[in-house]
Image: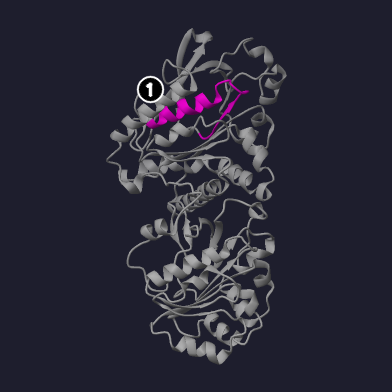
């Protein structure tokens, strides 16, 4: 183990292998110094020890440094070798490449944090994270952030064109600007790391075995400088062509054996860092559930919510109930193709409003689960006719006993040219007062193209939910550009995208119908 850091705020180097120096007739530890090293590339073919290098480095960093000083995140594009890292208190998330929305949340947060730190350092005249940590009190030091990617070649292949390449663009920005603000990217992949646009992002490279010896030239090595046999974990340090051996975590070198040692070490580290406050721990990116019930969401909803607040599903980094506040924005639109679950989402909003003491008036001109609300406390009426007269509609509104109320409309496109256009427009503009709201569901394309006054106001309010969007123009309904990557995907039943007027599109899971 290298000596401890001598300067307050500095982490000091950790050893994760040995380096052979024949010219000096000596060996020395293979070190990673977070205070002086930016990014690291681990290059090798399959089964050359790439994943083990990531595991060993993560274990060494976590064992040496407090959770308050170092936060770790991982993208596993392989066979799950990095999943045991999730047990470390330093680890905010290990994301599978198939968990696209979770990956999007994590990369989005990294780029936001990068921007925040750049602005902060500029305002305070701080050159980099090392300087910030040296000058700050113990509780004010920003943590080093590590992002590890296993099998980068798979990540690049899968996301080269996804959402116009935005995932790779965000990773490229982290590589370009992250080192100075304490964002370290550790990429493990094959020869593509020596030839892609990322190749020049760092000089810190370890080259493990490559199956084709002609590939060594692609990463900057002469094949003559490479031993004829490279066992797993044997690497060439590209800076000086020194030969290194990556350490293993225990005598059992199988994947299961290494994972077991890492899990046992994680339990000890959790006990050691039990006193680290929540504010100093890593941000978590919890995976959205594939299935959730209304009762489960209702139980986790905050108590004492205002009457016009509702939830439509669970989402966000902590997977909590999310939904509109009709006292803030008087409308909420739910759009989706037929049989996509938009009526189920509307029913969730209606039920949550009722639980908060908000009276509702339901308009359901077609068969809808909203009709089953008839007769429940707080439901003044259920209208089943799209041709309801304006005078009758106003009488129903006036008869609602509650001080606050919401009109709930299913298949709302049928009311685009109805007799109650003016009343719906009044609700949409908020002219009926702060105690009233309008929640509608319908075909996203029809609602987006609708020219009725109340539909125009609905779109201007920029608040709603999209389920299974079929076109880029569907985003007009909620006032936000939607990523191309989510268009036309069947996705998980109940998966939807929420916009609450803040410019952020959040994936949510809508409760199933019960």
**x and y percent of residue 3 in the render?**
35, 23
The reply, left or right, for residue 514 in relation to residue 50 is left
Answer whether residue 55 is magenta in the image: yes
Say how the picture is coloured.
one colour
Answer whether residue 248 is magenta in the image: no
**x and y percent of residue 184 in the render?**
50, 37
Figure disc tally:
1
**x and y percent of residue 96 in the render?**
54, 39
Quarter of the view holding residue 417 = bottom right
Q: Nearer the viewer, residue 232 or 426?
A: 426
Q: Name which residue lies at 65% across and 72% down.
A: 447
Mark 1: secondary structure: loop
Q: Residue furthest bottom?
A: 391
Q: Residue furthest left?
A: 275
Q: Which residues are magenta?
A: 38-62
Q: Name which residue lies at 34% across and 49% down.
A: 279
Figure check: 401 above or below 238: below
Q: Nearer the viewer, residue 407 or 369?
A: 369
The residue indicated by pointer 1 is 2
**x and y percent of residue 358 in the render?**
40, 76
Q: Name which residue lies at 60% across and 64% down.
A: 480
Q: Residue furthest top?
A: 25
Figure check: 229 above or below 236: above
């Amino acid at each position: 183990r290298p000596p401890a850091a001598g300067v307050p705020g500095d982490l000091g180097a950790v050893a994760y292998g040995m380096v052979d120096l024949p010219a000096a007739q000596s060996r020395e530890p293979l070190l990673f110094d977070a205070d002086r090293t930016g990014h690291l590339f681990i290059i090798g073919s399959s089964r050359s020890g790439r994943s083990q290098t990531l595991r060993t480095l993560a274990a060494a960093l976590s064992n040496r440094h407090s959770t308050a000083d170092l936060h770790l995140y991982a993208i596993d594009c392989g066979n799950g070798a990095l999943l045991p890292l999730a047990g470390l208190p330093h680890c905010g998330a290990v994301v599978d490449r198939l968990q696209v929305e979770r990956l999007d949340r994590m990369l989005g947060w990294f780029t936001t944090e990068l921007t925040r730190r750049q602005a902060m350092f500029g305002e305070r005249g701080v050159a980099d994270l090392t300087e910030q940590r040296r000058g700050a009190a113990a509780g004010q030091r920003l943590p080093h952030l590590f992002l590890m990617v296993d099998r980068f070649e798979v990540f690049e292949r899968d996301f080269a064109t996804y959402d116009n390449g935005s995932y790779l663009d965000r990773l490229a920005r982290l590589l370009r600007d992250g080192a100075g603000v304490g964002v370290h990217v550790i990429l493990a992949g094959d020869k593509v790391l020596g030839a892609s646009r990322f190749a020049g992002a760092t000089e810190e490279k370890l080259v493990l075995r490559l199956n084709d010896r002609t590939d060594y030239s692609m990463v900057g090595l002469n094949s003559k400088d490479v031993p004829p046999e490279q066992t797993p974990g044997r690497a060439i340090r590209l800076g000086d062509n020194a030969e290194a051996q990556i350490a293993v975590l225990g005598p059992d070198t199988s994947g299961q054996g290494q994972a077991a040692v890492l899990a046992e070490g994680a339990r000890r580290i959790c006990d050691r860092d039990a006193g680290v406050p929540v504010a100093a721990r890593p941000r978590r990116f919890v995976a959205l559930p594939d299935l959730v019930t209304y009762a489960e969401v209702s139980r986790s909803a905050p108590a004492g919510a205002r009457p016009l607040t509702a939830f439509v599903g669970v989402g966000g980094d902590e997977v909590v109930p999310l939904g509109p506040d009709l006292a803030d924005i008087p409308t909420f639109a739910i759009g989706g193709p037929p049989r996509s679950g938009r009526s189920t989402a509307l029913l969730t909003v209606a039920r949550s409003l009722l639980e908060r003491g908000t009276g509702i008036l339901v308009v359901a001109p077609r068969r809808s689960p909203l009709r089953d609300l008839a007769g429940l406390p707080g439901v003044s009426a259920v209208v089943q006719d799209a041709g309801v007269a304006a005078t009758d509609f106003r009488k129903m509104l006036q008869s609602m006993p509650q001080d606050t109320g919401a009109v709930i409309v299913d298949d709302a496109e049928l009311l685009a040219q109805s007799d109650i256009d003016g009343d719906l427009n009044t609700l949409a503009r908020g002219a009926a007062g702060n105690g009233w709201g309008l929640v509608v569901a319908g075909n996203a394309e029809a609602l987006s193209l609708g020219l009725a006054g109340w539909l125009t106001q609905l779109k201007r309010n920029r608040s709603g939910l999209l389920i299974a969007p079929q076109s880029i123009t569907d985003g007009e309904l909620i006032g936000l550009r939607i990523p191309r990557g989510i268009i036309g995907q069947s996705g998980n039943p109940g998966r939807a995208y929420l916009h609450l007027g803040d410019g952020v599109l959040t994936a949510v899971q809508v409760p199933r119908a019960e």
